[in-house]
Amino acid sequence: MKLYPLGNHTDPMVISYKDLYTQAQSNSIKIRRISGFEEHRPILLYFDTHENNIIWFWSVLLANGIPVISAPFGNADNRHDHIVKLSMLLEHPICITTDDLLSLFGTGHGMDLQTVDSLLKLDISSENPMCVPRYNSGSATATLMLTSGSTGMPKAVRLSHKQILAAVAGKASVRQLPRKRPFFNWIGLDHVASLVEIHIQSLWLGVDQIHAHAADVVSSPKTFLSLLHRHRVSQTFAPNFFLAKLVTTMQPEESDEDWDFSNLAWLASGGEDNDVDTCVAASALLQRYGAPRNVITAGFGMTETCAGAIFNLNCPDYDVKLGRSVASLGMCMNGIEMRVTVPGRGLQLASPNEAGNLEVRGNVVFDGYYRNPKATAEAFTSDGWFRTGDQAMIDNQGYLSLIGRVKDIININGAKFAMSNVQTALAQALNHRITRFVTFPSRAAHTEQVTVAYIPRDWQMSDEEIMKIEEVASEVCQLQVGASPLVFALREESAELLPTSTLGKISRAKMRILYESGVFSKDVELHLKRVKELKQGRHKAVNRDMNDTEALFVSALVEIYAGDPADIGVNTSIFELGFSSIDVIRLKNRIDGELGIKVPVTTLMRHPTPAAIANALGSDCHSRTMGDALSATYDPVVVFHAGGSKTPLWLVHPGIGEVLVFVGLAQHIASDDRPVYALRARGFEPGHARFKSIEEAVDTYIAAIRQRQPQGPYALAGYSYGTMLAFEITKKLEAADGAGIVQFFGSFNLPPHIKTRMRQLHWNACLLHLIYFLGLTTEAEAERIGESDFEKMSRDQALTYILELSDPDRMAELGLHRYSLTRWTNVAYDLPHMATNYEPEGKVEAMDVFYATPLKAAAPNREVWLKDHLIKWRDFCNTKPRFHEVDGAHYTMIGPDHVATFWAILRSALDARGV
């Protein structure tokens, strides 16, 4: 073994395996001389060097004790509490440490502290070296590995001799390694990966092992690469954050280094999500010096499974091909099985690509927690599988992907979101701008908020960089959870307080405790003060030169926006402000009234900033009528987001014909590096004839799709009535280009058989649906009106009734009057009227159905809706449709309250289809 002392990565200490055994055997005798020593009882080891941890780990084992390697204690504020809890868990154990670390323990913990210095002075010359205890083996506990204990009493995982040996044998069988090449570790031995995967496995294989300190490696990634080269390492470990640091700190001009990584066969990476872009860049860096393309091995493991036990041997290519942003984790090694079960349905197995609870079993899986029967019982299913606590899915190729921890969620206004998704999205957006960051939930007034603390690349950040980070983080969180985050930069002195694990992962749970106890209050106060000053200064400077149209637009945004006016300038997008469909209509009518023109809604959506709309309308917009000029040619396509490398998603309008209902969802989809288009019905603007048949609408939409996306694969989804149109579009595209050219086809809450329902939608009913969509009435009030004699009224009477019932100020705000409401209702009536004799026929290749609470007129509840109506899509699909239950009801499933959770489910479905 070669062990580099802290601060020294040129001159290692060398210990042979024979010398290790000799020292450990001698020490074991001394340990057995300690008063109070008992066989098969835990002995805590607290050291700050790899050398001591390794030597005394084996010393305790040979003494027939149970070694427990401790991670470094936390900051002084909670250190004593942690030590006391640890002592209670291990029943006031013997603790072996060094003289210089004794002061960390304090008093009142009940441990029997023994120092290496005092033990080495013991005279054992009178002991018979042949009188050694019989060494435990088999299913006996070999060691206890401690969990973090972030929110209470820590847990200790029992690892048996049999389990550890099964684990190293399984790991060794995963990938062929070069003979006699060493393993390299830079993580503390308190982590199961460094202890089992590196230290014990290299012993088992009879190869050398190199150990360096994390502080030296993390502070200088080049040191990591130099050591790989110097020792011709075959296997090592690096989590995602360190891979990202490697990529960002290694400059292209350093390609003249003579490093040789041709022996490097396995760089395991786990502990946190692996960003695919980071894996691609890091793979290219390592490949440059001779490493194989798939050297980075993303994987899954836990302390309970002796570290990595599920591995992706085709990283990053597998996930690049599927367009994933987070690396999948591969398949099981020998000694472990995995399954995903459907939450709330007992032990029912999930279908391929269906999300559920990840469970594992096998020889490498532990059998329980030390002195914690309650936690042990809760950890296993009735048929003996270990509940990992992760939400996951297994794809058609048998590859595992994690979705998030079951308990790692944030609750915002009653909606629950996985923090891992937020962290991943922020990492993709911010990693090149900051050194490190952590997201965690914290309390904010009546709910929780996403909180983002980051370490800047430069402690003296520029104003531009501060604001860019602020804007990017806010945009990501709005799209992920529908709410703005609290973002703050850490000062240099505060960065050292981050609760970091042995692997370098920052604990969200611990971070929340520190934040809410006020540890970072000064950082937050200073950062928010500076951001506020910068916003005010920026808008004063930018807005000083606004023209009249820009000033009008800014004024309208300020009036409609419920936040700080300082957030709005000439380049502020309505979508950045989280505008809803109704907000867009309000804005349009405010602009129409002020300018005396008619600006189509589509123009606002295509030019969503004051500067862009002013440019689109032209400098002489006050003196001319723009309505006809801007809308002379009908174009069904509304471009919500034109950029992105993934397959575009085409959204087909519901029965009211308008696409404003997609505004919130489109913002989320665009965050996925995906173009988003919507198809809007014809007939809203004067001079545009409404569609007369389904075939006319479908052919018009296909032509529009082909114009912007000439070739597949295609991805489409229809909301309610739009599902029928999307179904017909899909059939025609597949008939022309081949089965499967539409890689994703989604139905938002519509069954295949609709003619009965369409026949119920007389003109008055369409008017009622429309005013509900526009927020002119509540669902309950709409039901009350529908149950009256409203449907028997003439169109003129129904319009009069609705206009008298509606708030005139609200009508004026939306720019609605008798003529415009009539024209819109005509569109909303003609569309379903075209389908009164519609009979679905033919089949599509694949389909995803997203279902919510149905309209009462359609079905009494979700169960009947699914069982008696939606399930019939099976008759029109060559493969088994996938059904996804979502929050909300028919009219609200993608509304402001549910859009973030809907998007999370939709994104998983898109990923599962490889779109």
Image: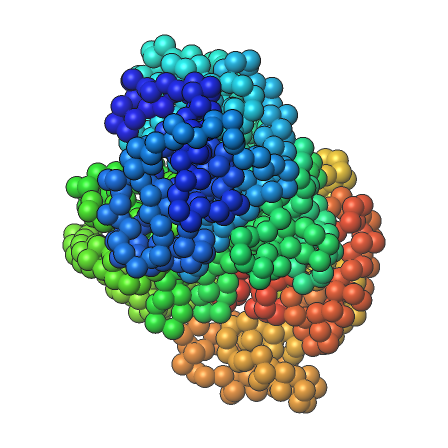
Image position, residue 576 (x, y; %): 37, 55
Q: Nearer the viewer, residue 203 or 903?
A: 203
Q: Determine the residue positioned at 59% across, 83% down.
A: 780
Relative to 776, say whether 337 is above or below: above
Q: Nearer the viewer, residue 879 or 753?
A: 879
> Which residue occupies the extreme bottom position in the image?
789
Q: Is residue 35 left or right of residue 354?
A: left
Q: How is the image coloured?
A: rainbow
Q: Is residue 90 visible?
A: yes
Relative to 812, say whether 260 is above or below: above
**Image quadrant occupied by the C terminus:** top right
Q: Determine the residue positioned at 71% across, 73% down.
A: 861
Q: How many labels were placed on the picture? A: 0
**Image quadrant occupied by the N terminus:** top left
Relative to 111, say whether 66 is above or below: above
Q: Determine the residue positioned at 72% across, 35% down.
A: 737
Q: Is residue 819 visible?
A: no
Q: Nearer the viewer, residue 893 or 677?
A: 893
Image position, residue 611 (x, y; %): 30, 51
Q: Nearer the viewer, residue 36 or 859?
A: 36
> Where is residue 215, by image quadrant?
top left
Q: Is residue 72 left or right of residue 265?
A: left
Relative to 870, say whether 233 is above or below: above
Image position, residue 408 (x, y; %): 48, 56
Image position, residue 498 (x, y; %): 30, 48
Q: Determine the residue positioned at 47% across, 26% down.
A: 129
